[in-house]
Structures are given as C-alpha cells and as structure tokens.
Amino acid sequence: MKKSSLLKSSTLRDTDDTQSSSSKLYSGSTYSNTAASADDVIHNRCQTCRKNFILRRKITCQLCLAVFCSDHCTRKRTLNGAKELSSICDNCDLEETKKQITEEIDEEILKVTEELKEVRETNERLFREHVNKVSMVNDLDMEIKKQEWNMKKQEQDLQAILETEQIRGLKLRNAADNLRNTLDELNISEKTMSEQTNAAEFDLENTKLILSEVITQKEDLQAQIEKIDISLNESLSVEQVRKMLCKKCLEIVNVNIAKKKDECNY
C-alpha cells in the first residue's frame, strides 16, 4: 500500500513537470507573423542579417511575408493545406517546428494523462482487491484459529473420554480377572464335587450291593424263622430247635427270644 502511494505521487509529479515545461515551450513558440517594416521592404534588406540583396537572392517568406536572403530562407513547407511547398524563413521554420513539437508534446501529455488515469484506476482497483484479499485472508486466519481452537477442545474432550474409557477398561479388566479366578475356583469346585459325586455313587453302589446282601440274608432268616415256626408247631422244644440251627441263626433266635421276653415283660 505504501509503495503504491509513492508510485502515484511520483507519477503525478512527473506529469505536472511535463505539463509545465510544455506550457513554457508553447508560450515561447509563438512566432512573429508581423509583416516587415516599410523601411526594410523599401531598402530591400534581409530581416535576419540586415544585408542587401546585391549579391544574394531575395526570397519572401510566405508565412511572415518578410524578405530574407537565400542564406536565411532555406526552408520549405506546405501552408494552409496547399499541395506545393512554400518558402519560409529559418525563424518561422524554427517556430513552426517548435509548434509541432509542442503539439506532439501536448498529445503525448494527453496520452500520458490517460495512461496515468488508467494506471490510477488500475491501482485503485488493485488496492481494493488487495484490501478485499487482505480481509479474506484475515477472515480465513480467524476461521483457521477458530477451527484450531475447536480441534484443540475436541482433542481435550477426546483425551478425557479416552482416559475415562481407559479407567473403565482397567476396572472391567480387573472384574474379568476376578470372574476368571472365580470361574477357575468354580471349575475346581465342580471337579471336586464331581469326584465326590463319583465316590458317592461308588459308595451308593456298594451300599446297594450290601443292602441287596442284607435283603438276601433277611429273606434267608425269614425262611429259617418259618422253618423254626413249623418246627415249633411240631412240638419241638427250644433246645431241639437250637440244636438244629447253625451258630449264626442260633444267635439271631436268641436275640429274638430275648426281645419277645422284654416285650412280654413290658
């Protein structure tokens, strides 16, 4: 922005200097179109060197209408749109040249002014675009900072969630370890109870076998008792019956007789 302002001020200063010099040149380029004085015409002297035309050719300037010698009227120009060239003095030629140069300078100044105007408009447009772009960059910068702040906040929130989940995961891991230990203990208990159940089933089978033997023995005893009852019915004495029984059956009979006696006494 500072560089553009310096360029504008320098360009305007150069334009002012050029216009000033052009105006000075134009002010000094007005040639004298006044006819020669009557004395000079009458005396036939050159308006430049003031010499007579005895040894020189006299030429009338078609622009200022004064007379000059051939040494000071060497130029020719087309005047007033004529096709033929007209003789003019060196002074008028110089003034016409200055006038043409002034016109060319004015045209160039006009062109430069237009170009400066275009450059000024271009600079203003570029300046506006620059301001707009700077504003857009500032907006983008603010948006980026806002997004960075949001991302940082989200990162902090996610970090807090991650820490919470890590703590929760640690608790779940500990709970899983406890459940695993409990499961191992249950498996051991199940294995122990299975072994105990197998042992109990084995004992139950043995008990069933023993019970079956006891039942068989009971049936045998009942049969023997029936035999004894039959024998008793045949009027056998107790002593005879005892002699007929085996030792084991005799013990059982003695026990039963003792029980019956106790029942009778009761």
Image (cartoon, rainbow, N blue to C red):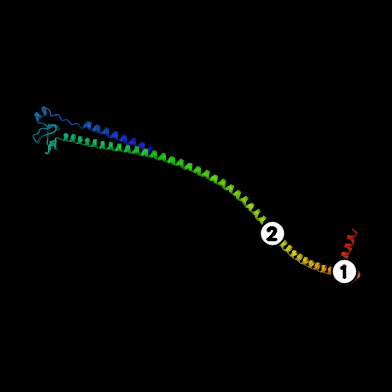
* Quadrant of the frame with the N terminus: top left
Q: Nearer the viewer, residue 19 or 169?
A: 169
Numbered circles on residues, count: 2
The amino acid at mark 2 is: Glu
Image position of 125 (left or right of 197) = left
* Quadrant of the frame with the C terminus: bottom right
Can you name the residue that lies furthest to the bottom here? 244
Q: Residue at x 88, y 72 (%)?
A: 244
On the image, the x and y values in percent for residue 258 come to 89, 63
Which residue is labeled 1 in the image?
233
Q: Residue at x 72, y 61 (%)?
A: 197
Q: Nearer the viewer, residue 202 or 152?
A: 202
Tell me if residue 172 can be seen. yes
Tell me the quarter of the picture where residue 119 sits: top left
Determine whether 135 is above or below 167 in the image.
Answer: above
The disc, 1 or 2, on the residue closer to the chain's N-terminal end is: 2
Tell me if residue 79 can be seen. no
On the image, the x and y values in percent for residue 48 come to 15, 32
Q: Which mark is residue 190?
A: 2
Q: Residue at x 25, y 32 (%)?
A: 23
Secondary-structure class at tag 2? helix
Secondary-structure class at tag 1? helix
Is the Cβ of the residue at disc 1 closer than 8 Å to that at disc 2?
A: no
The amino acid at mark 1 is: Asn
- Classed neighbour count for the residue bearing mark 2: other residues with Cα under 10 Å, few (<14), some (14–19), many (≥20): some
